Image: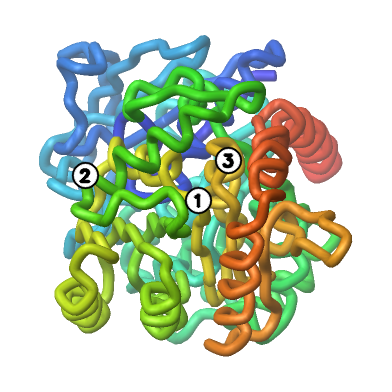
């Protein structure tokens, strides 16, 4: 199949969150199955053209935008069998951040229209858009490329791109309002959900959860109306990039057959962070945003329990300024036990995965989560809230020793604390190495999930053919 894969971010070119990991590895897995895959990305100002060998010039097209037509360039390169097309317009697209610019609504609407203009020439079999930034491409394709099937993936329903309906006129879409939209509002995600041939989410559990008021973010009725076209496919990870046997970011390499190097990585991480070098101290890692969705309130409440109980904590992330301030205070109070790094450092993240004994993900909600999958790969045992993809992939260690992590169901500090206590107790037994080896044997590569996406594409093509016929 000829597949057009459209995203606001993709590793290694531009990465903010888990979407970049998916868009940076799923296309390669689909190409390995014999498909012709093209990945479309905006050419953000943060992308290093020289590093990635991105040409200075490419095909140019005239893109309608409001009352004018804008000359836009499409520069392409090839990575691991995938053609990567960067939509290049310095004034309309290039910003110093992937998200958070004041004109995000207009620039991503323009990105959708620009991709659509290129698709009119390439005529793919399937157009696969991701999250609200690429959502308006779905109605554009449905109106203008009637033979192309459309798949829309929800990575996080909480971010829908709600904005003024004026963006619709800018890219040539009618302003007819959906029942879910407020007057003079455009909800890009809702519009994609309403019209895509298939709507997917990033785990089977999340696909069920978003049909409920608790997780539906006001779109549960719309999603229920499309239940027959809704599927959940759990994300995979790029097992080449996340491999403790070859990872260039970690000091010592190791594998499931010989995990001894992990102890050296723990020692190195403790030394790097100014922590006491102590093999017997359970070292907990956190990599992620310090925001409510990721359970920062539970993390903040649990930190003293860990640190006063003989544990250590390494935290990498940024987010809510109020919580950042609280964590700065904790770092001062627990100097030598807590290492805090505000911001994001990809290489440090790898060292945290490799050097930690346990990985904390008490997310309030989590569509899929990649942190727990990466931690498995590095033999780091996750402690998670049993929700969304976390509930699907992490199974609580029971009294017989079966399971691959520690989880809790009730979103309360006491429940999280109990899971931490159980994790620390198990760490201090001679059965810990067996658990490390067990989680390292888990297979969360893209191979199985990519095959499921191929089946979804085939179903979308059939659905589109019935509509067009």
Residue positioned 39% across, 42% down in the render: 266
Labels 2 and 3: the sequence-earlier one: 2
> Quadrant where the N terminus lies?
top right
Quarter of the rendering containing residue 450: top right
Residue positioned 45% across, 18% down in the render: 246
Nearer to us in this view, 82 or 103: 82
Distance from the alpha carbon under mark 2 to that under mark 3: 20 Å
> Quadrant where the C terminus lies?
top right
Name the secondary structure under disc 3: loop
Q: Is residue 268 above or below residue 109?
A: above
Question: Residue 217: x, y in percent?
Answer: 57, 79
Asked whether, in this view, residue 29 is left or right of residue 176, the answer is right
Labels 1 and 3: the sequence-earlier one: 1
Q: Which disc is residue 454 wearing?
A: none
Name the secondary structure under disc 1: loop
Note whether residue 150 is visible. Answer: no
Asked whether, in this view, residue 199 is left or right of residue 352, the answer is right
Q: Is residue 321 above or below residue 374?
A: below
Q: Which residue is mark 2?
A: 272
Q: Which residue is mark 3?
A: 379
């Amino acid at each position: 199949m000829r597949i057009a894969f459209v995203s606001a971010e993709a590793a290694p070119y531009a990465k903010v969150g888990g979407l970049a990991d998916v868009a940076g590895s799923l296309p390669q897995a689909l190409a390995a199955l014999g498909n012709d895959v093209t990945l479309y990305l905006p050419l953000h100002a943060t992308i290093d053209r020289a590093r990635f060998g991105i040409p200075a010039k490419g095909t140019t097209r005239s893109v309608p935008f409001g009352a004018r037509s804008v000359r836009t360039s499409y520069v392409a390169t090839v990575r691991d069998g995938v053609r990567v097309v960067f939509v290049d317009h310095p004034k309309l697209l290039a910003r110093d951040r992937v998200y958070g610019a004041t004109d995000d609504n207009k620039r991503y609407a323009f990105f959708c229209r620009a991709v659509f203009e290129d698709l009119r020439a390439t005529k793919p079999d399937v157009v696969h858009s991701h999250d609200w930034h690429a959502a308006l491409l779905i109605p554009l394709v449905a109106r203008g490329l009637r033979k192309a099937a459309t798949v829309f993936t929800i990575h996080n329903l909480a971010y829908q791109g709600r904005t003024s309906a004026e963006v619709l006129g800018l890219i040539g879409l009618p302003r007819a309002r959906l029942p879910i939209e407020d007057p003079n509002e455009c909800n890009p995600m809702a519009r994609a959900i309403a019209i895509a041939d298939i709507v997917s989410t990033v785990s089977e559990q999340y696909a069920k959860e978003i049909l409920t008021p608790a997780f539906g973010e006001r779109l549960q009725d719309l999603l229920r109306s499309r239940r027959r076209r809704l599927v959940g496919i759990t994300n995979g990870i790029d097992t080449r990039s996340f491999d403790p046997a070859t990872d260039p970011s970690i000091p010592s390499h190791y594998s499931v057959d010989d995990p001894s190097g992990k102890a050296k990585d723990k020692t190195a991480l403790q030394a790097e962070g100014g922590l006491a070098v102590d093999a017997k101290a359970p070292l907990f890692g956190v990599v992620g945003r310090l925001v409510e969705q990721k359970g920062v309130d539970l993390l903040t409440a649990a930190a003293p329990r860990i640190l006063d109980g003989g544990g250590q904590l390494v935290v990498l992330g940024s987010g809510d300024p109020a919580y950042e301030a609280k964590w700065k205070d904790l770092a001062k109070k627990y100097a030598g036990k807590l290492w805090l790094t505000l911001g994001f450092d990809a290489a440090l993240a790898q060292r945290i995965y490799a050097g930690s004994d346990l990985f904390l993900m008490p997310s309030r909600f989590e569509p899929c989560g990649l942190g727990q999958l990466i931690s498995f790969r590095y033999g780091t045992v996750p402690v998670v809230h049993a929700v969304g993809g976390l509930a699907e992939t992490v199974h609580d260690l029971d009294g017989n020793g079966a399971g691959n992590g520690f989880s809790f169901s009730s979103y309360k500090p006491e429940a999280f604390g109990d899971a931490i206590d159980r994790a620390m107790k198990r760490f201090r037994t001679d059965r810990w190495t067996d658990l490390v080896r067990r989680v390292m044997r888990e297979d969360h590569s893209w191979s199985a999930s990519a095959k499921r996406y191929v089946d979804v594409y085939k179903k979308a093509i059939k659905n589109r053919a019935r509509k067009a016929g």
